[in-house]
Amino acid sequence: MLNDNNPMTLEVEDESSTDSLFPALLTEKNQNWSEDEGQLNIDVAEGEDDLIIVATMAGTSSNKLELHLQNDLLIIRGERFSPISSSAQYFHRELFWGKFSRTIVLPVDVQHELAAAEYKNGILVVRLPKVKTNKSIPIIVVEE
């Protein structure tokens, strides 16, 4: 269980697994997620040293959040609960309530073991330190 005020841990999948790109989605604990989930809106930014993913999740408690990191994918899943009774009659309805998910293809290589996430005031912030590379890869020009 996650605490709203403390950093949470990401479940990092075994990077060597090639059986499936989404093994976290296929585990028994995730079988109850349906295909009609809502999609989570996100911002992805690149700082000098890390990749930052921000998502607003009003109405989601931290114990209803799942984060999985595998290779170049970050999967965020959760559930939002409406404060309005299900028997109420709506005059106007725009907000999404229920289960949601988002799979993000990371644009840069990250250090999986240093990944960190914080959920506070309905905002999830995931920080993924970038892999630092100073490799210079030579490119051979072939003359025709």
Image (tube, helix red, strand yellow):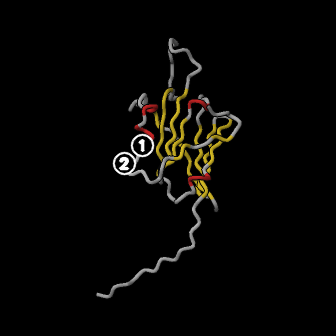
- Say what secondary structure mark 1 lies in: helix
Going by the numbered disc 1, the residue's amino acid type is Pro
Q: At which x and y percent is residue 17?
A: 42, 50
Residue at x 52% of width, y 59% of height: 108
Q: At which x and y percent is residue 109?
A: 52, 59
Residue at x 43% of width, y 38% of height: 25
In the picture, the disc for residue 19 is 2
Quadrant of the rendering where the C terminus is positioned = bottom left
Q: Residue furthest bottom?
A: 143
Specify the quadrant of the image occupied by residue 122: top right
Judged left or right of residue 27, residue 108 is right
Q: At which x and y percent is residue 40?
A: 51, 38
Q: Nearer the viewer, residue 126 or 59?
A: 126
**Contact (CB < 8 A) between labels 1 and 2?**
yes
Neighbour class for label 2 at 10 Å: few (<14), some, many (≥20)? few
Answer above or below: position of 110 versus 38: below
Q: Residue furthest left?
A: 144
Residue at x 51% of width, y 36% of height: 77
User: What is the CA distance from the residue labelled 1 to the residue labelled 2?
Assistant: 8 Å
Specify the quadrant of the image occupied by residue 129: bottom right
Neighbour class for label 1 at 10 Å: few (<14), some, many (≥20)? some
- Say what secondary structure mark 2 lies in: loop
Going by the numbered disc 2, the residue's amino acid type is Asp
Answer above or below: position of 44 versus 118: below
Q: Residue furthest right?
A: 5
Residue denoted by label 1? 23
